[in-house]
Image (cartoon, rainbow, N blue to C red):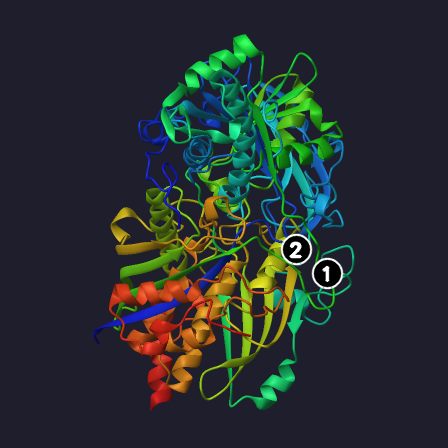
Amino acid sequence: MAIKRGRGIAALNYPTGMNLGGDPSQALIYMQPTGGFVVKLACTDLGQGLKTVVPQMVAETLGVPLESVNIETGDTDSAPHDMGQFASRSTHRVGNAVIMAAKEAKKQLLEVAADEMEASPEDLVISDGEIFVRGVPSKKKSVFDVALAATFKHGKTVSGRGIFLKQNHGVDPETGACDPDSTEAHCTTVADVEVDTETGDVKVLKLWSAYEVGRAINPKMVQGQIVGGSVMGIGIATKEASFPNYPQFDPHPGSFSEYMMMGAADVPEMESTILEMGSVDGPFGVKGVGEMTANSPLPAIVNAIYDAVGVWITDLPVTPEKVLRALEEKELSDK
Amino acid sequence: MKQLGIVGESVKRRDGIAHVTGQTRYVDDVSYPGMLWLKMVRAPVHRGILKKVDVSKAEAYPGVHAVVTAKDVPNNWYTILCLIGVGPNDEPVLADTEIMWRGEPICAVVAESEEIALEAAQLVELDIEELPPVMTVDEALAEGAPAIKKWGNNTFMYEGKPYRRVFIGDVEEGFAKADHIIEGTYQLNPYDHVPVETQTCVVKPEPDGRLTVHSNTQALYFTKDNLGIILQMPDYKIRLVGGTVGGGFGGKVDVVIEPVTAIAAMKTGRPVKWRWTRTEEFRNSSTVGMYRMHYKDGVMNDGRIIARQVISYHDAGAYHRHSPYGVQKHAFNLAGPYNIPNVDIKAYCVYTNRQPSSALRGFGVTPASFAIEVQMDKIARTLGMDPWQIRFLNAYRNGQMKAVRKVVEDATLIETMQAAAKMVGAELPEWCWKARSDDWKG
């Protein structure tokens, strides 16, 4: 009877976007008289942080301070269509839509600025809320002033529309041939576990992960997804069961004291690194990451258990009972 | 990659402080004068014929304003993916003639308070003739199994076939050439979304005839469209308000709380709130149903996988919901991020008398990735090969062909393996460090 250590790896892909596409997202953006921008979306923030990264992408595109961009979301009476937040689709699709809208607004803003500054719109650059003539930094006007001029002097709107759609081209009914996703993110996770051969208990000691996400709009938030997803993944692998005696229906957990989950004290040490290698059509090269993070711990842990004690637990969740039965079977067959 | 200014910076979350100081407004914070409360009466058995629903005592209970039954639902079908061709209609919004799972909604009591609604709900009398339920994929597919679906069998039909097939090359030829045949069966059992916030909805009938629906759905327009179909109302008369969700994970994409709440609001002329208890969230909201995957791989002595055959079964529970879509996504990912010239996949979406399955973080890909990566280690151990090296060898490269006959692009699996190997100090041969996702020349 002993505590055995093991290490396991898992290398995964995850598709970005609703399967096969056909999931559009739209955005509208308008400028207020003193140069603030409002983005209208019918998206939902589930905690993944859309309300934070959308202003980042818009501010970057426009060249204005981050705090001057606000998003209004969550009302179908005041924003155009969005398919919904799922399938790791939003930073990619909503991102592309808001960039498209921001570019249209920027073009209109530069046309007014060009008029005000007697320059050509192509020669103008916007940075940190100031509009410069490229190469002549002294010749500038603030977005604040140009906005006022657009509204009250020129009578010009500064607004934009955006949409992103990957068209659904269907599936070949015979071969299954299709184009299911916009891009694929990848990750590799390494798990160290400890298996107690007397009790069957499995303890996850540490997880290391490398995630390639195209571009991290907000690295700390990507890391948040990695940590949160890893905790969920460890829980799915080692604790969670809607029907603990599946396929028997009962017992049927109905509370937190009956449905086993990870608690704060169960969270192991975690180390992660983010790689950015761009993508074919992601905004700033973005790929989705929200779902993949909960997937990699499952096989990494099962592979680590095999490394530790030589048994495959291929029916999840891993429970002490399953580990002990597998060890017993192994002992018998080894004889 | 080009260095940018604001993109790439770890700026503070906009809503972070509000969340942690309890200032964020959620749907349960929405309240209207005169608002009523809804409680659902649910099926106590797995399968049966619903012969009679007697709501008279509940209706008469003091403080009860209405009881909503199947006959109050203008179009009593919930087929969320009907707009992308998933059918036929199989799930009623409120059970009408049959019970297909334990917990299925039957009728809703609408009252002055949650307590009154709960008390009155106990007085609803149900006359159900129980039928033997089909509780597993094996039972559903067995010879002579009762057909619990009206089209005569217990699987979703993908263009006339009871499975979604994906194939390329010829696996039998591959198996004949292979040095080893390595098999494995992998099963992921049902689990739950467990969001911190349970499903909640408030519907207000507006004086101008429109409906304002406050919901913590993950998909506002999706919900609006489906509501319009169920209520037989043009959906421009419906306004969905939400956008701040206390965790979704795919569990708030089904439109299962708004329709009955909306009907209750229209029937009583008052705002109505329905908030799910934690028990309802565990026992009655969708789970992710069981997946069981059988892998058979043809492998060469050097570790190359040259043929992969996968048969997969998913227990979708009682109704479609998103499962036909999910099983299809699952099928497209069962071969894995590896270069395998001969692949044959059959993925079955099977119905049983269980709590309906639906989207959950990783939808269809979670079980696939689990099976693929454990199978990879199994192959490595069988051949006495290092688990890292076998993955570097088989990893797909840009330009190669996937089983779904799409050319690989944006491949970065190899680079993540190298980064992870470096993090843990794994000793790898030079060829692994030199490998690149771009190194396949055709």
| Dot 1 alpha-carbon crowd within 10 angstroms: few under 14, some 14 to 19, many 20 or more | some
Disc 2 marks which amino acid? Pro
Horizontally, residue B442 falls left or right of residue B59, namely left
Picture layout, residue A117 above or below residue B152: above
Is A200 drawn above or below residue B258 in the view shown?
below
State the mark number for residue A184. Answer: none
Mark 2 lies on a secondary structure that is helix
Residue drawn where x is 73% and y is 56% of the image: B149
Which chain's residue wears label 2? B
The quadrant of the picture occupied by the C terminus of chain A is bottom left
Nearer-the-camera pick, A3 or A278: A278
Q: Are marks 1 and 2 on the same chain?
A: yes
Return the residue at label 1: B158
The disc at residue B324 is 2
- Give the mark nearer the N terminus: 1 vs 2: 1
Q: CA distance from mark 1 to mark 2?
A: 8 Å
| Residue at the farthest left position | A2
Query: Residue B34, image x and y in percent?
Result: 55, 13
Location of residue B224 with respect to B143 vertically, above or below: above
Compared across the picture, whether A110 is left or right of B259 comes to left
How busy is the neighbourhood of tag 2: few (under 14 within 10 Å), some, or many (20 plus)?
Answer: many
Q: Is residue A201 in view from this perspective? A: no
Q: Nearer the viewer, residue A144 or A171?
A: A144
Q: Is residue B4 above or below residue B327?
A: above
Please say if the residues under marks 1 and 2 sit with CB atoms less than 8 Å apart. Answer: yes
Total number of numbered discs in the rendering:
2
